[in-house]
Amino acid sequence: MEYSKLPDLSSLATLKAIVEKGGVAGAAKILNIGQPAVTKRLRSLEQCYGITLMQRVSGRLNLTEAGKRVYQTASIMLERNLALQDELKSLAEGGHILRLGVTFAIGEHLLPDLLFQFNEDHPEFRIDSRLAYSRNISCYLATGQVDMALLESSAEHPDILVQKWQDDKLWLVCGPNHPSANLKSITTEEMSQLRFVLREPKSSIRTALDRSLAEMEVAPLKIAFEVGSSEGIIDVLERNQHVSFMPRFSVIERVEEGELCHIDVKGLNITRTLWIARNSAALGHSVAEAFIKLIQAS
């Protein structure tokens, strides 16, 4: 195969920077090079592929159809190269670094205490964590970009091994001054009349909720709007106009402190499993084994 005609990573990184930073000036700043150098790298990349990758429309550089394909490939290659650097760094340091993927809700509410305790118990180890959606983390695991993950839904891939971490329930919650706050329980019919603020459809929480309500044949909820984080939803609930389904672990402290109220729904019990997942190639990872021991004991 003829590898001499392939583009170098710096040219691919330049294309990615131009797209994501909105132009040559932004790319030059983030890459710490001059604007002429950015333009030269782009032209070199176009010569390499023999096709125009970007064109100016109304004074702004936009990707051509060919450019879109190159940009997508460049993003994958550059991210994989960064992951490889992390892998090699971990090997050089004796495997004392764990690359951990975590879903947003777990990362916001459970991970900080776990990391603090782990650092106290194992100062010789380090955990580098990244937050993402479960489906993206599964991809990271399968491709070796992370060694281990904490997930809100099981990963299905031949190279990913999962084990149960703990059970979690989705609670219906509202602000302390919401009209439903003092009710001991409500029916599913009464619940369906409330105004909801929920996580976005592709989130683990929303996927579990939609599946469970469909299985129980509960009427569609009245969704006022969607918010992309658990903390954002909690901020909305404190205004006492909406209700939401939230992971118990993310709201239990606020419920105990009276900042939120848990509403029991008759006949409705949404339980899911939180999972520990690992790439089969990362079995025996000393940091992973130590971290798993800690979180299972928590």
Image: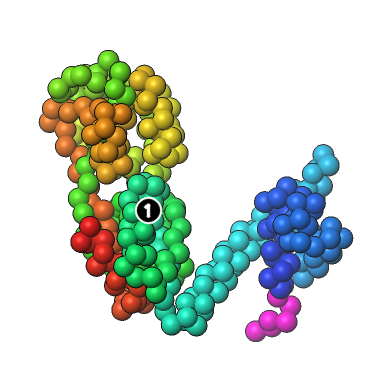
What is the number of callouts on the image? Answer: 1
Relative to 61, is 235 on the left or the right?
Answer: left
**Amino acid type, residue under disc 1 in the picture:** Pro
Relative to 73, is 205 on the left or the right?
Answer: left
Mark 1 falls on what kind of element? Answer: helix
Q: Nearer the viewer, residue 61 or 228?
A: 228
Give the residue furthest to the top. Answer: 179
The answer to whether residue 209 is seen in the rendering is: no
Magenta residues, start to end = 1-6
Relative to 268, is 175 on the left or the right?
Answer: right
Task: Point out the image quarter for the N terminus.
Answer: bottom right
Does 3 appear in magenta?
Answer: yes
Query: What colour scheme governs how the chains and residues are painted in the rendered image of this protein?
Result: rainbow
Relative to 45, is 223 on the left or the right?
Answer: left
Q: Residue at left 75%, top 51%? A: 26
Q: Nearer the viewer, residue 219 or 166?
A: 166
Give the residue furthest to the right. Answer: 36
Task: Point out the image quarter for the C terminus.
Answer: bottom left
Q: Residue at left 27%, top 15%? A: 179
| Residue 82 percent across, percent down from the top left | 56, 69
Mostly what secondary structure, the magenta segment?
loop
Does 119 appear in magenta?
Answer: no
| Residue 10 percent across, percent down from the top left | 72, 69
Answer few, some or many: residues within 10 Å of disc 1's Cα (few below 14, many 20 plus, some between 14 and 19): few
Q: Which residue is mark 1?
A: 112
Image: 190 above or below 250: above
The answer to whether residue 20 is seen in the rendering is: yes
Q: Residue at left 22%, top 46%? A: 168
Which quarter of the figure has residue 46? bottom right
Image: 269 above or below 243: below
Q: Residue at left 74%, top 78%? A: 5
Q: Nearer the viewer, residue 7 or 130?
A: 130
